[in-house]
Amino acid sequence: MTRAVLIAAALLGAASVAGAAPTATPGVTSNSILVGGTIPLTGEAASAAGVARGADAYFKYVNARGGVFGRKITYKYLDDGYEPQRTFLAARQLVQQDNVFAIFNSLGTSNNVAIRGFLNQAGVPQLFVASGASTFGRDYKKYPWTIGFIPTYSAEGKVYARYLLKTKPKAKIAVLYQDDQYGKELVAGLQVGLGAKKSLIVKKVGYDPTASDVRSEVASLKASNAKVFMIFAFGKFSVQAFITANQLGWHPQIVVNDVAAATSLMQLSPTKATEGAISIVFGKDPDSPKWKNDKGMKLFQTVMKRYAAGQNPNGYYAAGMASAYTFVDTLRKAGKNLTRKGVLNAATHLNEKNNPFVLPGIRIHTTPSYRFPISQVRLERWHKDHWVIFGPLLAAKP
Amino acid sequence: MSRVGLALRAAAFVAAAVVVALAPRFISSYHALEWSQVAIYFVALIGLNVLTGYSGQVSLGHGAFMAIGGYTSAILIAHHHVHDVWTIPLAGLVAGGVGLAFGLPALRLTGLYLALATFAVAVAFPPLVRKFDHFTGGNQGLILNLHTNDWLYYLSWSIAGGALLVGWLVLATPIGRSFRALRDSEVAAVSFGVSPALYKTLAFGISSFFAGVAGSLFAISSAYVNPETFPITLSLFLVVGLAVGGLGSLPGGVVGAILIQFLPTYAQHVSKQAPQVIEGAILVGVMLLLPGGAAGLLRIAANRSVVHSSQQS
């Protein structure tokens, strides 16, 4: 009797092992795909953790509906505290220890730069990098396994330039920017966009990303008497910029970059300062009443309720889901016989028109030599505690 | 040190060296990388122990001295194509030189004020790197050569073994005795002819040399440096590692290094939502149970089992 049970158990065990027998591709079995990523779960940038958690929730939703070709996606995301050194260790762990199929949706410019060489040497796809630095889409000849996702910062700067030239062609411009790769790329985009009218920028002041506040910088910009104030900042610094401008009684036309323009951040600033501010948008904002009855945002709320219960369903989660949706699409396109080469090929031949988490009309489009999946945006204006979208879809090419 | 003690210590060192040399056969490639990081933190902790544990000066800025070493290596490798390994001693010398120079003004400060001054170094370093971005690479950082995990493991542990021997040797000489004398009573030390100025700066220099070597290894193993490679929290973690390993015991640093490397990962396993709370709770627990650190625990055990007088180093 016991022996029979043992044999049966052994057979069952063997069957389940055979069922999950690994194919030649790391991280892929007949019923699972292991995908890795890094994200700040701790530290100053921890509020962005929703980008990974939102993607994870969407994968769970896809899994509950059968996965991709019968394979369930496991998304293993590790905390890097936003420190490149830890991103590097985490990526090595994911690739060498956990044998992930690909790295997906890792957040941060330096963090992704820190792992790009290693991933490309190992031939591991680094897909849909969560950073707008153009290097991730531009340098594909050197780093063929890497591709970005959101519009680049330089493209964003150009969009603002075009808008200003059209609506306020003579207004003097003052720029506050974070003095690093991120802020400098936005400024460079703005300058390229202004072209011959570059001299409209009467003053630009950078702040150190580890500074405690930007009060003196804003004060010196006010002294320039500019009529347009560009805030190319990050997190708390944008809030400080709004508050300081208001305290100084300076009420120019404010333009604030996308990363610094989260609804939750904007609501922290005095309405007198934020009213009328301009930014760009490409993803649907769960905090906006515009999408209350939208199918995509209803799906977002359902997924959040079911797979990320108790978490605040904000724009970070929606951004993560947008990325995850495209990733699932890419996996489908790569076909039943999933390989790393196949998924890279699919990621560089995207033509997705129905991503429910990005603005209607945006086509997520790539070719092997054009690796900027989202390169369309719209403008939005802050009005009565919410962003209101206006104007048509605009090209945002780097 | 008694002859028996020396023989025991030598035997323990050889046994540890054998274990370390054989370990990669039994652990995965990724674990080899993790343990090479332990060796790197160990080297930094040996240096910090010379300063804090033996000469009684507190530094909250050793992450910055590591950064100086790391950037020295990175610049030599990326801009001048020097072979990675040759940059390690140079990185140590540069960091040691800066440490000596810093030791001079720091002489006027003691205790808490010195700690604050060193912390200022840690805070000031990242903006300096951004300022001189034409050769530090600024925020974009510098990309270095990739190495295999096993190579990094053997490199780091060989250097850690060497660092431990050098540390012991220094402390066994009259220099080490002067450090301890200054730590225990500056007045008494001076009356015996020990120059506080000379030995305090020397301690800073030696300690920073170790930090520079560790920083160089850190950069080489990460294959990338940018200002956030050496965050301010690194300096704080080193002090915590020192306390956990035990002040005044060089080998105890291994325990501190293990803690620095594995605590954040472990805390993440326990709670994805609030790993830092777990980290803090574990640290408080360790310090309550082991106020003398790992070395203190060993000492208690040794005192109980060995009947004759204990040797406090």
Image: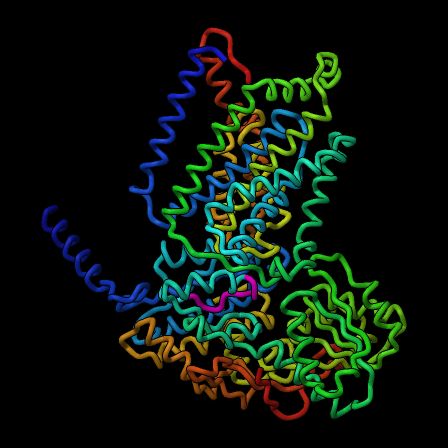
Residue A342 placement (x, y as % from top left):
33, 76
Who is closer to the viewer here, A397 or A357?
A: A397
Whether the magenta-drawn stretch holds residue A105 is answered as yes
Check the image and tell me how it is coloured: rainbow
The residue under the point 56% across, 54% down is B75
Above/below status of B143 relative to A160? above
Q: List the single residue furthest toward the top.
A: B308
Residue A84 in sight here: yes
Which residue shows up at 34% across the image and 71% down it?
Answer: A340
Of the pair A390 and A252, the residue shown nearer to us: A252
Task: Describe residue B21's horizontal placement relative to residue B212 as left or right.
Answer: left
Left or right: where does residue A364 sit relative to residue A65? right
Residue B308 belongs to magenta span: no
Residue drawn at point x = 81 percent, y = 65 percent: A217
Across and down, in percent, residue A160 comes to: 69, 83
Point out residue A31 in the picture as x, y percentages from the top left corner.
28, 68
Q: Is residue A194 above or below residue A385?
A: below
Image quadrant of residue B27? top left
What's the magenta region? A103-110
- Residue B34, given in percent of the width and then of the height, sits at 43, 46
The relative height of residue B190 versus residue A313 in the rendered view (above or below) is above
Residue appearing at x 40%, y 80% in the figure: A329
* The C terminus of chain A - image quarter: bottom right
